[in-house]
């Protein structure tokens, strides 16, 4: 991910960040610095928690997020520490944080060694934030995009935020052009650009495109921040305008909850956008760079009060002008490359039940070469050739008689060709699990038409808090596998054939087995390709187990599949009917008739408890018809 930040200004003044926006200090004082009922997640670089500005803050690294040593002098640690301090700097310290009393969760995603991350890792961070119960997510970063459309992973994660009412606030970017960054360019995010002390757009702040509808600007010049090692400094950029907006949103949400309102953080986004101050600059080109306008704390607080009283959806825009302010001019910009990672202590919240393909990695050249030396030569077309450790068939044959060597590999779970986890068998069943991995890899390399061909695998485990660097340089989180229970190799051909026989035996329809098989394949592929996920959130584990439990699903759906219906939607929601100690989810699958769209839909609901590493279904499957 690429993001621009500025260097440190040599001048330090007594001016507080709370005085940069009119009305901000009054809101801060009114809420007492925020409410512990509000949770803000910061997706950024590692944070130096030993800095005195964080002493007393309710702030920790997310469970399941990578923990990096916060050493001074590293650019990513500086970025994470400085952004976090704008929000959580404690009263009486060198940094007055905007919302020091809210609950804070830090999710480091920037690799301190390479300063890089993929959109997959940012998506992983967003999902971790949601799992932590975040109301608001601050992401002071982004990746330049010609189209403003993120990869599917990131698009799905941002969409999940909107669906669950979580407010994602992201930097508009520091390219200084009519151009976009993701995820800020996603319509449901709140994009933040930067202005100077005169209310004018800073030269590096991006504008244009969807930003005119989903973005606003805030001070981004010489923001007072903490730096690793106990220092403080002033930094500039959209990276630092972003936590100012996040802090305002957190205080507004705190005020609402202190008054007993259940306002969604996502509604606060609408209030902030609809109450921005219009441009009063004489240049139309400069006005276009202020996105939808300048943040207006007083107007937003007033409008939110009216919303709480009347619960109207529409907010009348405040009158006024966004020019003027107290921030000084910006410093020169410095480009920084930034990117994501993951992991912390095992906990119920760090369970994983993921689907994908099994693969392996050597990590280093010496380890790869050691396999090449130990593996026997092979005969190809009558010729004896040196072994190739990258040939999975040769490796499987070698591991079959040297199973202990499986421990020297880095086993990975991939979605498409992207590794998402490193798998680490452990405990009393470690040897058995390594054997299971070798067997699954052997099934994957069989011909696609073979009945024993394994198309994908299901893996239950726990995030350990550790990461592993692969041979390619990619860093992936480690999932510990303690028990082979729940590990499945999907023998797709055999599964579909058996399930089709089950359906045909139960169905009163005259549907051909081939049609039923096609519908079943469509169901399995829909879950895997369209709803693919990281298997961390409880709802995702429920969906993944529903797909794994396809034999049961096939018999349950016999009427629908036998009648030529196909899967239309899969939805999950917390189950109202479950044991008190369960993390139970209702998975609802809706089927439709592609040849008669006026025919009633058929809905099937079954409950899955994902409180343990091995999910389990609860009760009977229920079914009903619905018009839509």
Image (cartoon, grey):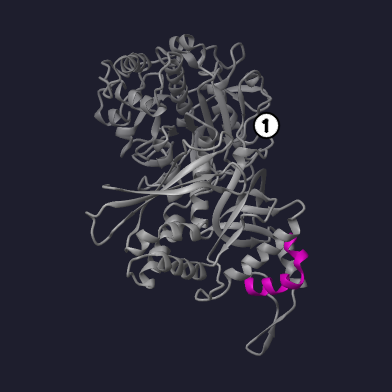
Where 614 falls versus 65 (above or below)? Answer: below
> In the rendered image, which quarter is residue 349 located in?
top right
Q: Main secondary structure of the magenta part?
A: helix
Q: Which residue is mark 1?
A: 72
In the figure, is residue 178 to the left or right of 420? left
Is 403 part of what is drawn in magenta?
yes
Where 342 falls versus 427 (above or below)? Answer: above
Measured as percent of width and height from the top left, residue 590 is found at 36, 51
Measured as percent of width and height from the top left, residue 102 is found at 54, 20
Q: Nearer the viewer, residue 437 or 577?
A: 577
Measured as percent of width and height from the top left, residue 42 is found at 53, 31
Measured as percent of width and height from the top left, residue 78 is found at 60, 31
Q: How many marks?
A: 1
Mark 1 lies on a secondary structure that is: loop
Residue at 52 percent across and 56 percent down: it is 549
In the image, the segment drawn in magenta is: 391-408
């Amino acid at each position: 991910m690429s993001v621009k930040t500025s260097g440190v200004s040599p001048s330090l003044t007594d001016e507080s960040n709370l005085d940069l926006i009119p009305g901000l200090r009054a809101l801060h004082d009114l809420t007492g610095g925020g409410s512990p009922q509000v949770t803000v997640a910061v997706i950024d670089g590692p944070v130096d928690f030993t800095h005195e500005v964080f002493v007393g803050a309710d702030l920790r690294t997310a469970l399941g997020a990578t923990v990096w040593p916060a050493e001074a002098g590293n650019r990513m640690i500086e970025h994470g520490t400085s952004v976090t301090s704008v929000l959580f700097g404690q009263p009486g310290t060198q940094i007055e944080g905007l919302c020091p009393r809210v609950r804070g969760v830090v999710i480091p995603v920037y690799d301190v060694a390479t300063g890089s991350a993929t959109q997959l890792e940012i998506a992983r961070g967003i999902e971790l934030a949601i799992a932590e119960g975040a109301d608001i997510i601050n992401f002071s970063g982004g990746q330049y995009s010609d189209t403003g459309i993120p990869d599917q992973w990131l698009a799905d994660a941002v969409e999940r935020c909107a669906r669950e009412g979580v407010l994602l606030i992201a930097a508009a970017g520091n390219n200084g052009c009519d151009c976009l960054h993701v995820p800020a360019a996603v319509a449901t995010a709140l994009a933040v650009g930067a202005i100077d002390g005169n209310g004018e757009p800073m030269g590096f702040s991006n504008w244009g495109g969807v930003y005119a509808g989903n973005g606003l600007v805030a001070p981004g010049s010489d923001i007072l921040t903490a730096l690793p090692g106990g220092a403080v400094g002033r930094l500039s950029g959209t990276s630092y305008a972003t936590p100012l907006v996040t802090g305002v949103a957190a205080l507004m949400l705190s005020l609402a909850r202190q008054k007993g309102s259940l306002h969604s953080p996502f509604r606060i986004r609408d209030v902030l956008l609809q109450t921005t101050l219009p441009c009063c600059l004489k240049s139309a080109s400069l006005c276009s760079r202020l996105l939808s306008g300048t943040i207006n704390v007083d107007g937003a607080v007033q409008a939110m009060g009216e919303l709480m009283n009347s619960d109207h959806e529409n907010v009348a825009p405040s009158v006024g002008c966004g020019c003027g302010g107290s921030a000084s001019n910006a410093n020169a910009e410095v480009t920084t490359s930034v990117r994501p990672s993951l992991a912390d202590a095992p906990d119920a919240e760090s369970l994983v039940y993921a689907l994908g393909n099994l693969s392996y990695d050597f990590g280093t050249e010496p380890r790869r070469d050691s396999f090449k030396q130990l593996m026997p030569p092979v005969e190809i077309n009558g010729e004896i050739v040196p072994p190739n450790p990258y040939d999975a068939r040769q490796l499987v044959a070698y591991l079959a008689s040297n199973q202990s060597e499986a421990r020297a590999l880095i086993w990975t779970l991939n979605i498409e060709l992207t590794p998402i986890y490193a798998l680490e068998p452990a405990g009393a069943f470690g040897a058995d699990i390594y054997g299971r991995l070798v067997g699954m890899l052997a099934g994957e390399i069989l011909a696609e038409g073979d009945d024993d061909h394994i198309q994908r695998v299901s893996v239950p485990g726990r995030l350990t808090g550790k990461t592993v660097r692969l041979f390619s340089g990619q860093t992936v989180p480690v999932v510990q596998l303690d028990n082979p229970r729940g590990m499945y190799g999907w023998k797709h051909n055999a599964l579909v054939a058996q399930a089709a026989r089950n359906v045909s035996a139960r169905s009163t329809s005259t549907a051909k087995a081939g049609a039923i098989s096609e519908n079943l394949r469509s169901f399995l592929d829909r879950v895997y390709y369209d709803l693919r996920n990281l298997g961390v959130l409880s709802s995702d584990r429920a969906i993944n187990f529903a797909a794994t439990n396809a034999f049961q699903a096939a018999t349950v759906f016999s009427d629908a599949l036998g009648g030529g219906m196909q899967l239309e939607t899969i939805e999950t929601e917390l189950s109202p009917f479950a044991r008190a100690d369960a993390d139970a989810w209702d998975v609802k699958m809706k089927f439709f008739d592609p040849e008669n769209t006026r025919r009633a839909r058929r809905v099937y609901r079954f409950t899955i408890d994902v409180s343990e590493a091995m999910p389990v279904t609860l009760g009977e499957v229920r079914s009903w018809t619905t018009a839509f």
